[in-house]
Image (cartoon, rainbow, N blue to C red):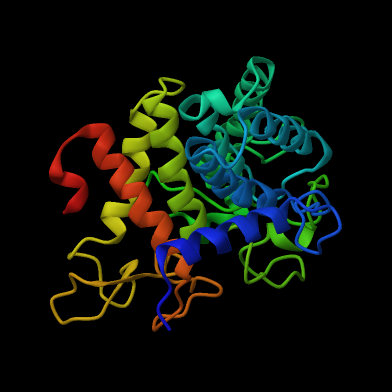
Amino acid sequence: MAHTLEQYKVMAQQIFSDLLCASSPNSIYTNSNYWQVGNVYDTLLDYMEYAVTQGTMSLTTARNINQQVVTFYDNMSGCWYDDYCWWVITLTKAYTHAPLFYPADITRCQAIILDAWGIVNKGRTGIPYSGGAARAFDVCDQSVYFPVKPLYDGGTWQYDIYTSRNPSNPCDSAHNNPIPVDGLTPPMLGPYQLSVINGLNLVMTQRLSTLNIIPAIDAARQYNFIRQWTSAAQNAAYNLLNPFTSGGRYGLIRERVGRYLDGTVPMTGYLPTYASWAGDQGTFIGGLYDYFLLIRTLIAWS
């Protein structure tokens, strides 16, 4: 059944109200999930900009909502590196949607961005083997984890790499181990080069580069990693782009990269056929478009 634009506007307003209703089971005020709140907040900001422009929400109301939501960051904590990416991506809109924030809250958003980016970039302070999403393999115990050396440089890992014999991380230690070692079974999610963290890192680094918070080379490094994994030279069974056609030009981004450097250890959780997340497709499309805007050449479309 087709819906009119006006019907979509009404539905958007209803969903927005539901998310901000404290008694609703969908309320962001009662949701303690760090990444989910950061994810949803991104869309809420877009709606508030629209509503204020259309005159259906006052600027004061929008500012008061943002003042409250920003405080959520201090009352929650992330786990995997992609969790922090959601908040960085969302709060860069404090720059592009600045009128929706009180000046003090823009300053707070800037501090949150630096805090969350610091964790993704350099790891968790005081935790051994925590070097940031891009350096998870570089700082792990390579005498144990040499089989998971990445095929290509430049990508990001979902999590730090170590076993339960090491000091505790804020998350379950079962997520720390990508190969069978010390009696631990590798998890389906955890310390892998998943598409969600690599797509989000592409979006995050280019937005931070656009704002001159980090150098553009960080975005280029992530883009080049993705380009290598989706190149025509990559074996079709392991190409990050799962093709729909014989030419391999069209397809879906797989859920994770498919192999390590030596190829002798199968990637835990990797399915060579149709394992793809719908959300990853949007993240990669958005990230590549943003990267195109950042460098202003057509190479991002190749």
Residue 248 spot, x, y in % from top left:
19, 74
Give residue 203's position: percent from left, percent from top: 42, 43
Quadrant the C terminus occupies: bottom left
Residue 153 to residue 191: above or below: above
Residue at 21 percent of width and 47 percent of height: 300
Q: Is residue 214 above or below residue 264?
A: above
Measured from the top left, where is residue 217 in percent x and y?
34, 29
Residue at 16% x, 45% y is 299
Residue 68 appears in which quarter of the rendering?
A: top right
Residue at 29% over, 47% down: 289
Quadrant hosting residue 133:
top right
Q: Residue at x 30, y 40 (%)?
A: 291
Residue 107 figure quarter: top right
Q: Quadrant of the N terminus?
A: bottom left
In the image, residue 118 sits, relative to residue 267, either above or below, namely: above
Q: Is residue 232 left or right of residue 190?
A: left
Query: Is residue 38 something that shows in the picture?
Result: yes
The single residue placed furthest to the right in the displayed view is: 23
Residues 134 and 202: in front is 202
Left or right of 274? Residue 267 is right
The one of 69 and 119 positioned closer to us in this rendering: 69
Whether residue 151 is visible, yes or no, is no
Residue closer to the observer: 162 or 118 = 118
Q: Position of residue 46 (x, y in %)?
A: 51, 43
